[in-house]
Image (spheres, rainbow, N blue to C red):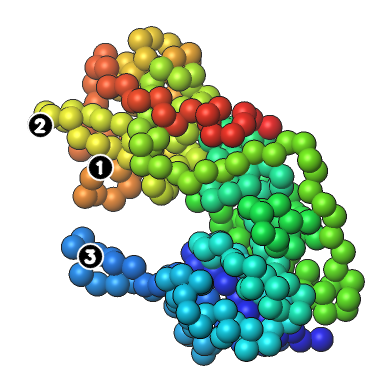
Amino acid sequence: MALRVVFMGTPEFAVPTLSEIVGQGHEVVAVYSQPPRPAGRRGLETKKSPVHEIAERLGLTVRTPERLKADGEADFFVSLGADVAVVVAYGQILPRAFLAAPVNGALNLHASLLPRWRGAAPIERAIMAGDAETGVMVMQMEAGLDTGPVAMAERLPIGPDATAGEVTERLSRLGADLMVRALAALSRGALATMPQAAEGVTYAKKIEKSETRIDWHRPAAEVHNHIRGLSPDPGAWCEMDFGKGPERVKIIRSTLAEGSGVPGTVLDDALAVACGAGAIRFTELQRAGSRAMKAEEFLRGSRVAAGIVLPRGTGEGDPAKQGGGGA
């Protein structure tokens, strides 16, 4: 049986779920997304969110309120007469009136194995903490932050060199399939939920710019996890000097390497760098204003000689300070 669905989502991660819901024949009565934001180098243009763009292509009604608590928004939401709201990385907390309006409440697709990594950046935090696996869960929403009972889950191993971008893409596809299965069960009156475990709660706080710089005094495994957890965006970075003073270089990919030395020391001519314990090797980098390059191509135009010492970072990106260690 087709359901009347209000979809609420913003980033690319949410697009497959919206597409699958429409493809399964459910009636999407409205799509909520974050408002268009300034874009371009000077911020003179605005850019619609990925969900906004796909919703318009599908001919769906789109609403982009700055605040759900604005006058009239709750009344309009109630008037939609939805069977259920589906929320995927929307970007605003739903007031109680919105949670209560649909007949079956709101289902949230969350990208972690709850109760681990509740909050804004679960994929990045899982990788930065060195977790061996993650997943997606369909959760019945309630007033608390990602505290609601869980209906369905899919697990996903995290490879030792997997980046946040790669894991996000895989989870978005898994999550889309999981949500349409949940809606199918809901339409039959067969969607059961279980409370989250009381133990193992951690929080995935928003990624701050202050924690993106690489700290070479941390062990190699932590530096590697830091790099891949922030790749491709916002990107972990360090400073290098190519003859005109230090400049910021984003590290897209790395791998663990042999060797040791003073933290930050470039150990060879192939971009191995010593850490607090062990070493890593850059395998993909990006200079400001340039495209990302594999290490071999990067070195053809940007010499980084063995023996130089890269400046250390601040150490503010320690995953142990963000709500838990590795799984």
Quarter of the N terminus within the rendering: bottom right
Residue 149, how many percent across, how many down?
78, 56
Q: Report the Cα–Cα distance between label 1 and label 3.
A: 22 Å
Residue 33, how many percent across, how many down?
49, 72
In primary-sequence order, the first of circles 2 and 1 is: 2
Quarter of the C terminus within the rendering: top right
In this rendering, position of residue 204 left or right of residue 295: right
| Residue linked to disc 1 | 287
Please tell me which residue is depicted at 41% across the width and 29% down the height of the picture. Answer: 316
Q: From this view, report whether residue 251 is shown above or below residue 112.
A: above
Instruction: Say what secondary structure mark 2 lies in.
Output: loop
Residue type for callout 1: Arg
Residue type for callout 3: Gly
In this rendering, position of residue 199 left or right of residue 255: right
In primary-sequence order, the first of circles 1 and 3 is: 3
In primary-sequence order, the first of circles 3 and 2 is: 3
Q: Report the Cα–Cα distance between label 3 and label 2.
A: 29 Å
Q: Report the Cα–Cα distance between label 2 and label 1.
A: 13 Å
> For residue 43, which numbered disc appears in the image?
3
Q: Is residue 23 visible?
A: no
Q: Residue furthest front?
A: 71
**For residue 30, which quarter of the picture?**
bottom right
Residue 246, how many percent across, how many down?
18, 30
Residue 167, how many percent across, how many down?
58, 50
Please tell me which residue is depicted at 54% across the width and 34% down the height of the picture. Answer: 322
Instruction: Say what secondary structure mark 3 lies in.
Output: loop
| Residue linked to disc 2 | 244
Please tell me which residue is depicted at 52% across the width and 80% down the height of the picture. Answer: 73
